[in-house]
Image: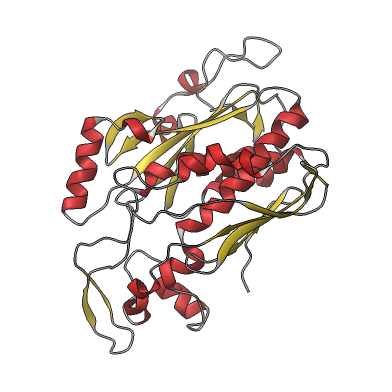
Amino acid sequence: MTMDTFGKKFRVTIFGESHGDAIGAVIDGIPAGIEISEGDFSADISKRRSGAKGTTPRIEADEPVILSGVFNGYTTGGSLAVMFRNTNTRSSDYSSLLVHPRPGHADFVAGIKWNGYNDYRGGGHFSGRLTLPVVAAGVIAKKILAEKLSRTVSVSARIVEIGGIATDIKDLASIPENVAAAIESAAEEGDSIGGIVECRVSGLPVGIGEPFFDSVESMVSHAVFSIPGVRGIEFGDGFKAAAMKGSQHNDPIADMGGRTVTNHAGGINGGITNGNPVVFRVAFKPTASIRKEQITLNTTTGNMESLVVPGRHDVCFALRTPVIVEAMTAIAITDLLA
């Protein structure tokens, strides 16, 4: 039994495996009367799609099919189910993983947890492929945020570091030369690199969130850490705050709208939005599936043996994650509003 649901009132349940027939999401807690069609998902889905340098050569159509919850172009108030077919799989690439679990992957722990009955192909349910229905749920969450708050709310993420190189990437069609060179170098070595994504949420009013367990930081972190490959998250000044003095870190309040002179807290005080942009950064590890030879356990013999991972994988999957971070953030905040 797995628990693949996030949220209390706005709930997102994902289903499927990387090489199964289809993947998708069932979303509950959607108000009736929100205009939605398959075309509304296109813009965000395209930001996650592979094809740019450093991303996997596995290209999928990623065409959403709405199965329920929409009638005559508007949400009905019932469960909305959206599905995506898997059409470009090469499952034979993963046959060796039955006895050679990949270092850095969930192959070993999944096999132990589910007694070998898990679908290991392409990472199965642990695959980054499952972030596609998350992005679809994020599209709906963004629509709900705008409608419930009756204002313009912007959830926008960008890449600020790749492989230790500071950068500012909003569009994968224009990757800076130094970043492209780092990606190419890692690819030639059969290796991979990670990155950092910064997300900014503007337009939120004062008062969203709860103290302690349902704080904005707690809920966003819970959702964001569900993205495969996340290794850290920090809000506002984050870890730099530990080296600051209170006089440096405190944000002077400038007006009754909550505007502050600085934003060291990242738009949150006491777990509650303070009217300023919510700002946080997310660290993504380098892709675990690499062509470079590694050592791993042979689960049949008990010996450690060499392994070269087959298949099609991102050299830097962080490149495709900003829109996923946006989606998880929108889902978490929508749940807090519900």
Q: Nearer the viewer, residue 247 or 65?
A: 65
Q: Quadrant of the N terminus?
A: bottom right
Say how many tags the image has.
0
* Outermost residue toward the top in this view: 254
Q: Nearer the viewer, residue 57 or 224?
A: 57
Q: Quadrant of the C terminus?
A: top right
What's the image's color scheme?
A: secondary structure
Q: Position of residue 336 (x, y in %)?
A: 72, 40
Q: Nearer the viewer, residue 198 or 267?
A: 198
* Outermost residue toward the bottom in this view: 301
Q: Is residue 40 left or right of residue 44?
A: right
Q: Residue at x 54, y 27 (%)?
A: 265
Q: Residue at x 41, y 30 (%)?
A: 170
Look at the image and tell me whether residue 226 can be seen: no
Q: Position of residue 24 (x, y in %)?
A: 61, 58
Q: Nearer the viewer, residue 320 or 275?
A: 320
Q: Is residue 88 left or right of residue 34?
A: left
Q: Position of residue 171 (x, y in %)?
A: 40, 31
Q: Residue at x 64, y 26 (%)?
A: 153
Q: Position of residue 133 (x, y in %)?
A: 58, 52
Q: Residue at x 57, y 64 (%)?
A: 22
- In the figure, 144 relative to 231: above or below? above
Look at the image and tell me whether residue 63 can be seen: yes
